[in-house]
Image (cartoon, rainbow, N blue to C red):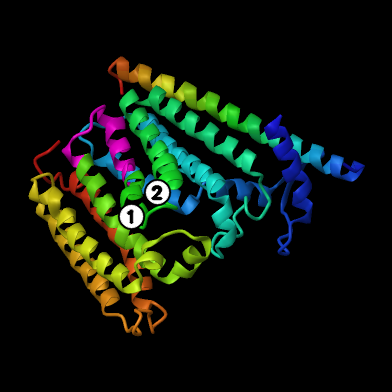
Amino acid sequence: MGADAAMSKSAVQDPAKGGGDAPLRLSGSGTTLDLSEVRDWIALLKPRVMSLVVFTGLIGLLVAPVRLHPTLALTAVLCIAVAAGAAGAINMWYDRDIDARMRRTANRPIPAGRITPEAALGFGVTLAVASVVVMALATNWLAAGVLALSIAFYVFVYTMWLKRRTPQNIVIGGAAGAFPPVVGWAAATGTVGLEPLLLFAIIFAWTPPHFWALSLYAHQDYARAGVPMLPVVAGARETRRQILLYTLLLAPLGLSPWLLGLTGPAYAVVAALLGAGFLYQAWRVLRDEQDAEGRSLTRDAPARRCFRYSLLYLAVLFAALAADRLALGGGAAG
Amino acid sequence: MTPEERQVFERRRRGRNIALLVVLLALVVLFYLIAMARLSRAAGLG
């Protein structure tokens, strides 16, 4: 009943949707499915976050020493994607009040009134359960369990507990985004070993400098919403210092698979260059021109560059790891 | 609800029902493929 009412409200509200976004329609025998409505449901899944999660999960599968049947591997990646989307939808349901206060998120489907909160929650929970069950059927219960843990961590630990309470929300909550390679590895092998835990640690250490670089130039949005992100609570100067500190931790962590003999020297060269590049970006952020209170005089240009570099860093580092294992057969493991 | 709103609502609901049907059929195909893959692996073929 609740879902029906939710659909009804959504359906009645849609024709009044503003913004000059004329709905495209797939029509046939009196049936209309607005593509704009489909886009809203997809937006609930946070597709940009999902793409990164899928990529790291796929790397977990590829670097595992056991080859999974292609159908099962594709299903595992699909489950990781759907689980990430489900967690995103539940996050949007819970955060609808603060999303409405932030410019960056005010046009999301729930605060904009295009999808009701109840419908979004039902959608997220259904997808979460389905992704875990299908993962168990296609691979094994360990992978399904880690997948369920990652959803629960993102929803309960990050979204509901930490996000509104502490500036360390990103540090601890970052673990949620670090699970996918562990899930991928567990799907292929049925175990969790040192290598997936190293991948977990790399993403865990990567998340704070990645996210704080973004929050340096989006802190007014977080302040308006009352979210205690580090720049809001401790100021921009301290945030720049923390970005450099976490990058100092991340650079050797990126090298750790080679240091432990799990990869060959080609990976080590790539990891060293990437780590040095990240340190340079973090240093530039620290040395940004700023006023007496630490506010950037360059519209946070170094932080924007650092944010973009962090995405490149993770993509190339993990691709190098997969290439090392697949093409070069590097390292002792496997 | 006015008749026009009712008509829009019913059309949308039909659209959603078709979308749901497509998802269910895709799940049937997926479960079949998973079963085949697991069987071939169990038989040492995959």
State the residue lying farthest toward the right: B3
Of A122 and A325, which appears nearest the observer?
A: A122
Q: Amino acid at mark 2?
A: Leu
In the rendering, which numbered label is found on residue A142? none
Q: Is residue A315 visible?
A: no
Up the image or down, A299 lies above or below A174; here it is below
Residue at numbered disc 2: A162
Where does residue A273 sit, x and y in percent of width and height? 18, 65
Q: Position of residue A117 (x, y in %)?
A: 62, 43
For label 2, the SS is helix
Q: How many marks?
A: 2
Q: Relative to A74, is B44 on the left or the right?
A: left
Q: Label 1 is placed on what type of residue? A: Gln
Q: Which residues are magenta?
A: A178-195
Look at the numbered discs 1 and 2 and tell me whether their residues touch, using CB distance below 8 Å.
yes
Q: Secondary structure at mark 1?
A: loop
Q: Which residue is mark 1?
A: A168
The picture quadrant where one finds residue A209 is: bottom left
The image quarter containing residue B20 is: top right
> Which percent across, then down, holds residue A169?
37, 53
* First-in-chain label (1 vs 2): 2
Q: Which quadrant of the rendered structure holds the N terminus of chain A?
A: top right
